[in-house]
Amino acid sequence: MITPNANYPAFSEKFSHQAACGKPARALLHRLAGVVVVAMVVAFSAPVVAQTDLERQAQCELSAIRDTRSPLAVQYIRSACNWLVVNGDSLLNASSKGYYICLVRQLSGAQSNEAAAAIMSACRTSNPL
């Protein structure tokens, strides 16, 4: 290794200058990389949430529609699952949540539209909106 002496006067200044300039440059590079990562997370978070909502709705429908033969019951189960996924965590809609949960639970397995209509009426009565 060459050490600074009379033959190489700028040697020590050159490396001390690079070291001083390298740290801010490296810090700037790290900040820039951090900004890029944050931007990517924000940009891709909406589609991930939408996919998760679709998956949650599909799971809700699959669990409730399984043995249901009534077209009316299937329609209301789908609607209730959609409402629960979109609004289920909202405190503003807490009073309506019981009604939609009742629909999903009680309409499951309904064999006729008449039975589905009676179940929907009972859910409405027991969980007033």
Image (cartoon, rainbow, N blue to C red):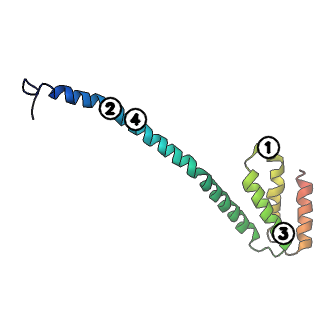
Quarter-of-image position of residue 116? bottom right
Check if mark 3's residue and mark 1's residue have beta carbons within 8 Å.
Answer: no
Residue closer to the observer: 129 or 119? 129
The residue that mark 1 highlights is 92
The residues tagged by marks 2 and 1 sit, at their Cα atoms, a distance apart of 51 Å
Indicate which disc, 4 or 2, sits on the residue closer to the N terminus: 2
Q: Total number of numbered labels?
A: 4
Alpha carbons under labels 2 and 3: distance apart: 66 Å
Calculate the distance from the C-alpha at mark 4 to the C-alpha at mark 1. 44 Å
According to the picture, the residue beneath numbered tag 2 turns out to be 23
Residue at image point 80% right, 70% down: 74
Q: State how far apart marks 4 and 3 are (Cα).
A: 59 Å
Residue denoted by label 4: 28
Residue matched to label 3: 73
Q: Secondary structure at mark 2?
A: helix
Q: Position of residue 41 (x, y in %)?
A: 54, 48
- Among the two numbered marks 2 and 3 on one chain, the one whose residue lies closer to the N terminus: 2
- Which residue is nearer to you in this view: 6 or 32? 6
The amino acid type of the residue labelled 3 equals Ala
Q: Nearer the viewer, mark 4 or mark 3?
A: 4
User: Three-letter amino acid code at disc 1?
Assistant: Leu
The residues bearing labels 4 and 2 have C-alpha atoms spaced at a distance of 8 Å
Horizontal placement of 124 versus 86: left or right?
right
Q: Residues within 10 Å of mark 3 (few under 14, many from 20)?
A: many
Which is in the foreground here, disc 4 or disc 1? Answer: 4
- Disc 4 residue type? Leu
Identify the residue at horizontal 21%, vertical 30% (top origin). Answer: 15
Could you tell which of marks 4 and 1 lies nearer the N-terminus?
4
Q: Please name the amino acid that badge 2 sits on.
A: Lys
